[in-house]
Image (tube, rainbow, N blue to C red):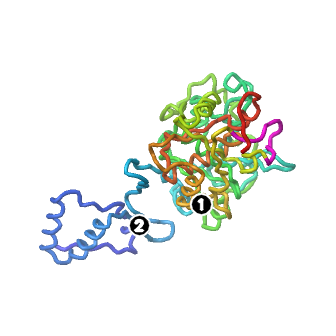
Amino acid sequence: MAIKLPNHNSSASRTCWKEVNFATTYHTVALLALCWLDPAVKPLITMMKRLCYIGIATKCSLSSGFTTQTKTTHRLFQTSSTSRMMATSNNLVTIPDAITAHKQNSKHIKFIDGSWHMPVGDNPRNGRAEFTSGPRIPGAFYYDIDDIAPVMGSDDNPKKLPHMKPSSKMFASAMDQMGILPSDTLYVYATNDCAFYHRAYWTLRSCGHDPALVKLVQGSLDEWKECGGELEEGQLGEDDERLFRMSDLGWEEKTPTYQCMSDSENVVVDMDQVLDIVNQKDTADAVIVDARSAGRFVGTAPEPRPGLRGGHMPGALNVPFTDLLDADDKTKFRPMDQVRDIFIKAGISPDASNRKVVCSCGSGVTAAALAIGLEECGLRNKEDITIFDGSWIEWGSSDSTPIVTD
């Protein structure tokens, strides 16, 4: 009996082993017997034993021929003898990986533009307007965090706070409108130099879609084009289904078909809960981390929104979200070992049994960057991270909330 080893340049070789694992002694004995019967098998046996010994997994990249890279099968951030393993989502994907996914033309892979910009200044950028004018990834929808949110002044949002987390029904209705199924894999991307698309990604993962099926594309549309990714140019018509508004759907009177994976109530905290944390001080089971700039945190820089007091919540830590991002490309995080160091230096204990983390910012958008960074660098599990949805707009506009400037 002879076994023909596959040619790495053949199409058959593109079906790669994802993991090599000798699970039982039986398998080992069988392979040794096969080796004795046919010496031609020896090179294969040797290679497999080496792979098993060093415990690696092989990843195949089909976007640039046949290439492989290895990674350890276990990621363990062990900081003390009592700490547990911190699970990272591994959902940050490169532009080449995203292009490979897009080229599959699968109906179960959806791309979503999550771009958003601060509405301040004389000529602020607008994510919806830029999506409408293009360029955009073909087939992508736009996730409007301002529109897929409780209407300001409604019973669900009496304080008129911007881009609050949508209800499960509103979220499911938006998923229906975009043709998204619970089993679909979602790739969230942003336009060039957009540092605020993390909220769309966080919302999709926190409001009911399987978190493992939501990916955050690391890189700009310029890089997408440079790497050979297809782009759709031209202005979209006003009646394009991708430009839907929740107010036009009549979703309140309909039963959505999309089924949220889980209850999303515990992913955010309100002002009463944050007040409890502040009042309990060091005995609280959570710590607050503020994503605003250092100047705004201590009250020396003005708030971009009028009528808000400066400073921060007593006991809060400051991690400006821009510190976590690549200095040359805001659509990318820094390497996660650097992100982890930034959090630790700011006062976030690497001890997994320590307090949970409440992320805050100006209005709940950049707090999502902190939440993602905390999970991806391994300092906290997803269930140990929440966002103060009202953030500084709610806290700083109240006359009764405590504020410090040191």
Residue 215 is left or right of residue 73, and the answer is right
- Name the residue located 60 percent from the left edge and 48 percent from the top edge: 370
Classify the position of the C terminus by image quarter.
Answer: top right
Q: Residues within 10 Å of mark 2 (few under 14, many from 20)?
A: few
- SS at badge 1: loop
Q: Provide the residue designation for mark 2.
A: 70
Looking at the rendering, the stretch of residues picked out in magenta corresponds to 300-312
Label pair 2/1, CB-CB below 8 angstroms: no
Q: Residues within 10 Å of mark 1 (few under 14, many from 20)?
A: some
- Residue 64: within the magenta? no
Residue 300 x/y as whole percent: 79, 48
- Residue 308: within the magenta? yes
Residue 100 x/y as whole percent: 52, 60
Residue 186 is left or right of residue 194, and the answer is left
Q: Earlier in the sequence, mark 2 or mark 1?
A: 2
Q: Is residue 302 in sight in this rendering?
A: yes
- Name the residue located 63 percent from the left edge and 40 percent from the top edge: 315
- Name the residue located 39 percent from the left edge and 62 percent from the top edge: 72
Q: Nearer the viewer, mark 2 or mark 1?
A: 1
In the image, residue 56 sits, relative to residue 183, either above or below, namely below
Residue 355 x/y as whole percent: 51, 40
Q: Is residue 244 in sight in this rendering?
A: no
Residues 377 and 206: in front is: 377
In the image, residue 206 sits, relative to residue 92, either above or below, namely above
In the image, residue 375 sits, relative to residue 95, either above or below, namely above
Asked where in the image residue 192 lies, by quadrant, the reply is bottom right
Alpha carbon separation for disc pair 2 and 1: 21 Å
Q: Provide the residue designation for mark 1.
A: 334
Residue 250 x/y as whole percent: 66, 26
